[in-house]
Amino acid sequence: MSKMLCDVCHRLPAFYHRRFEGTRLCRMCFKKSVENKVRKTISEHQMLRRDDRVAVAVSGGKDSLTLLYVLRKIGSRFPDFKLKALTIDEGIKGYRDEAIKLAREFCGKMRVHQEVFSFKELFNLTLDEAVKKRNERHPCSLCGVLRRRAMEVGARKMEVNKLATAHNLDDELQTFFLNILHGEPLRIARNKPLMNGAGGLFIPKIKPFHQILEKEISLYAYISGIPFQEKPCPYAGSALRNDIRRFLDEMESRHPGLKYVAYSAVSKLKDAGELREGFTKCALCGEPSATNICSVCEITAQT
Ligand code: SF4
Ligand code: ZN
């Protein structure tokens, strides 16, 4: 049987079938298609300027290392564009150390300056300690609150003007369903691909991968020889997000293209809703907060 050729270059053998589009792509054309999509996302949402100083939140997982790789490639044409890597050490024994090592080595290879900020140093407790002391049933919610603050403080210390995170289309779709199942529909409008920082209170955040499927990022990382941590976080198993992921993956395999259609509907909701939140300063730590005492101080005071 003759090998199928790539539908784009018609020269090289196809290695990936993008089922929802009905196209077969060779390695090079697949890589280019992902990079072009990221470029398009960046320009559509005006995520970046040529003279931005951007910190990429790098965990050591495939998505974040791939984002660093792609942004470095895209940014290399602009001499005033500065890229750094920001890593958060939550303090998860037997898991985070390996990821940090991988992230450090990859940043060294990419010649990107990296800084690590730990929960222990910022909040005087590791995630493991907080989970144990509180007998926490939802470690991911706790981790999320502390990590958002750690990234904010870290980015400020690194003197960048934007923070890029590697949330992909699957993450965004899962978050949408999580918000619905947690009964928090207003959060849908808050979570945008470009968050402008509420008038200078926060560092603006961008999500250049928000229109890329997780499986295509894995493939891109594999073709590009990007080494990443495959071991899952020990707290991830019990998360509701995993059940939603399994459901969406099964739906996608039965109905190719379903994730794109669903995400495009979610994006319309995000665009339609503008959530205006009032911020005050937390009475304890002075960070911007929607309530008198911020969630970070509530957590650290209770542990
Ligand atoms: Fe934190 Fe949950 Fe992610 Fe583990 S899986 S790093 S606990 S958010
Ligand atoms: Zn506070």
Image (tube, helix red, strand yellow):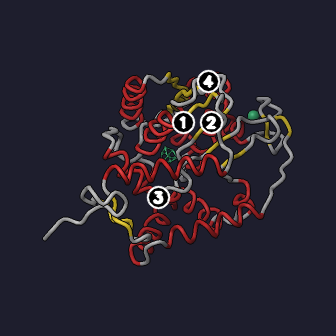
Residue farthest along the left direction in this orientation: 1
| SS label for mark 2 | strand
Residue mark closest to the camera, 4 vs 1: 4
Mark 2 → mark 4, Cα distance in angstroms:
17 Å
At label 4, the amino acid type is Asp
Q: Amino acid at mark 1?
A: Ala
| Residue 80 - label | 4
Give the mark, 2 or 4, whose residue is nearer the N terminus.
4
Other-residue count near label 2 (Cα within 10 Å), few / some / many at <14 / 14–19 / ≥20: many
Give the farthest residue toward the bottom.
254
Asked if disc 1 and disc 2 are in contact, CB closer than 8 Å, the reply is yes
Q: What amino acid does circle 2 point to?
A: Leu
The residue drawn where x is 44% and y is 55% is: 214
Mark positioned earlier in the residue sequence (4 or 1):
1
Mark 1 highlights which residue? 57
Distance between the alpha carbons at the discs numbered 2 and 3: 21 Å
Q: Alpha-carbon distance for marks 3 and 1? A: 19 Å
Q: Secondary structure at mark 4?
A: loop
Q: Is mark 2 within 8 Å of ligand 1?
A: no
In the displayed structure, does residue 207 sit left or right of residue 10? right
| Most foreground residue, 162 or 43 | 43
- Please give the residue where the numbered disc 2 appears in the rendered image: 163
Dot 3: element: loop
Residue 135's x, y, as percent? 54, 47
* Up-down relation of residue 107 to residue 290 (above or below): above
Mark 2 and 3 residues: CB-CB less than 8 Å, in contact? no
User: What number is the disc on residue 213?
Assistant: 3
Residue 146's spot in the image, x, y percent?
A: 62, 38
